Amino acid sequence: MALLKREEWQGFVRDVDWSYRYVDDEAVYPEWMSGTGKVPREAWLAWEESYKVSYPEYVATQREKEAAVYAVKAALQRSSAFDTLTEGWKSATKMHFGGVALVEYAAVLGELKMARFGLAGAWRNMATFGQLDEMRHAAITTFFGHEFVGKDAQYDWTQKTFHTNDWVAISLRNLFDAMINTSNVVDIAIELPLTFETGFTNLQFVALAADALASGDVNFANMISSIQTDEARHSQQGGPTLEILVEHDPARAQWVVDKAFWGSARAFSALTGPAMDYYTPLEHRKQSYREFMEEWIIDQFVHTLEQYGLKKPWYWDEFLRGLDIWHHSLHMGLWFWRPTLWWRPMAAVSPDERAWLVEKYPNWEQVYGDKWDVIIDNVNNNNVEATLPETLPWLCSTCHLPACNATQSRNGTWRVRDVQLDYDGRIYHFCSNGCRQIFWKDRDNVNHQTLIDRFLAGQIQPMDVGGILGYMGLTPEVMGDDPDYEAWTKDYAGRPAEGIAAVAQS
Amino acid sequence: MTDTDVSADLGDQDQAPQLVPLNAIFATDFVQILVPVTTANTMAEVAAAVAYHVEGKRVRALPHPKVVIYHGEKMPAEMTVAEAGLKPLDHVTVEYDIPEGS
């Protein structure tokens, strides 16, 4: 007897939307988990994924992918490829491993929630594959990072980061707890697979894979390319969900997309921006972060919005202006507060690198050059001490990243302006208008306390730099430092340097 | 107010200084920072406390006096934090007070 074709049987095994006799639908799909809102319950039965797969097909494909990626890893383990990588590129990978490994695990939880509470059998089926994907991603990322722990203790933060109170970890936990752990499945499908994965992981996985290959890190490129091949399938959960939500509640659809895009853009400007425009060696940079954002993120996002009949977010102009600012400021912040990092950030502001930055970002010298020059002059006058932090940067109450977004005045000068909100008896400060608006609209949510909030509440003891580093889990062998001060300061040595800090008397 | 309400009789200057953590930005610096001061500090001392973290470290020092700007107003150098009404988590900007035409 001939086997049935997949399309002849898949509906029977996929669409298991039973009629309940002993409980009502609300008991099985409670609103706080399933989040149907204004959408009629039966409308979800039209949910249909465009790219179908059966379990045997899934297993066969995934087995091939795993075999391929581990074969490359095994072959490279015997080579000395790791030792030839630059410190800048190693930092990009440490940041990726620590920042991503357990986000993949959080994504497992999100997919599991959709696999259980998704409002159609087809959706739950797709989420079941999705959670298997994310489990693979969490495992592969942790395993690949772990390989280097013996060579460099900072790689231990692959697994450790999300278990600490490091400010980068708090920022990412805040984003993904909101996106995944505290959301209902309708919002998750739009925030995680649609906005974050379809919209942004291309940037981290496609762009960074290109930089990895150029930097000679075949293993890393191999790992993230393998991960990326899964995204195309499970990320399609967003489309059908958004289509149904837009039809019945377009205002909610617009808000969920807007919020997720903004939060993702802030996080990527901290992690991917510095990796692409500073840590990747100059000769290996393919495109600037801005160029990648324009080509891979913005065009596609605008196309998606139009496709579903949504508008550009209210913050669009502020977001576009931020492409020249956010990641450059965050790079300077990461570098200045480098003892709080689990990687070794390169300043990467030698004359050649600055020329590249100005070519890509014409305002770069005007906004950042003067401050890097003071830092360079301090290093060249044997005063590295003056380039180390003695207080905390102010952290935004929404994105938990430093409030460091300069905007241009009418007279052409660039200044960081305070964006604050008096609410419920206290003052909140934000990095941007976008973050303030999201905080205001979501003000009934329980947000993580920022590191500033924790410090002022006395949770961090002693209340000094040592106490802060200890609270964040940083130990001396891990604390970040610039791997090569001379590389970016030597061309400026010997120039007159007025107005720099006096060398502290010991 | 009664005769036994001693603390209420004390002026700002007679009370024990209270900690006032501020959100501050120094001139053209790239980031807002946390700067703790007390109610007894003068505006000149607040300006110096903010400048300590930035001046000569990220912003080149200039030979001009520094002034605290709070709610858009330049605050007198001798005024205290208590007198100025600065509250915990308030924002201040510290700028160089550069004479016109210089």
Image (cartoon, coloured by chain):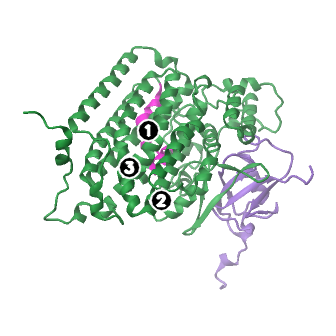
Chain colours: A green, B purple
Secondary structure beneath disc 1?
helix
Image-based side of A478 in relation to A37, left or right: right
Numbered-mark total: 3
Mark 2 — residue? Answer: A255
Residue B7 lies, in percent from the top left, at 66, 75
Residues drawn in magenta: A152-175
Labels 3 and 2: the sequence-earlier one: 3
Q: Is residue A345 visible?
A: no
Q: Looking at the image, is A147 positioned above or below residue A239?
A: above
Residue A193 lies, in percent from the top left, at 39, 46
Question: Mark 2, residues whose alpha carbon is within 10 Å: few (<14), some, or many (≥20)?
Answer: some
- Considering every residue shown, the one lying at the far left of the view is A1
In whole angstroms, how far apart are the C-alphas of marks 3 and 2?
15 Å
In whole angstroms, how far apart are the C-alphas of marks 2 and 1?
26 Å
Magenta part mainly helix, strand or loop? helix
- At 53% from the left and 63% from the top, the residue drawn is A440
Residue B100 lies, in percent from the top left, at 91, 54
Mark 3 — residue? Answer: A238
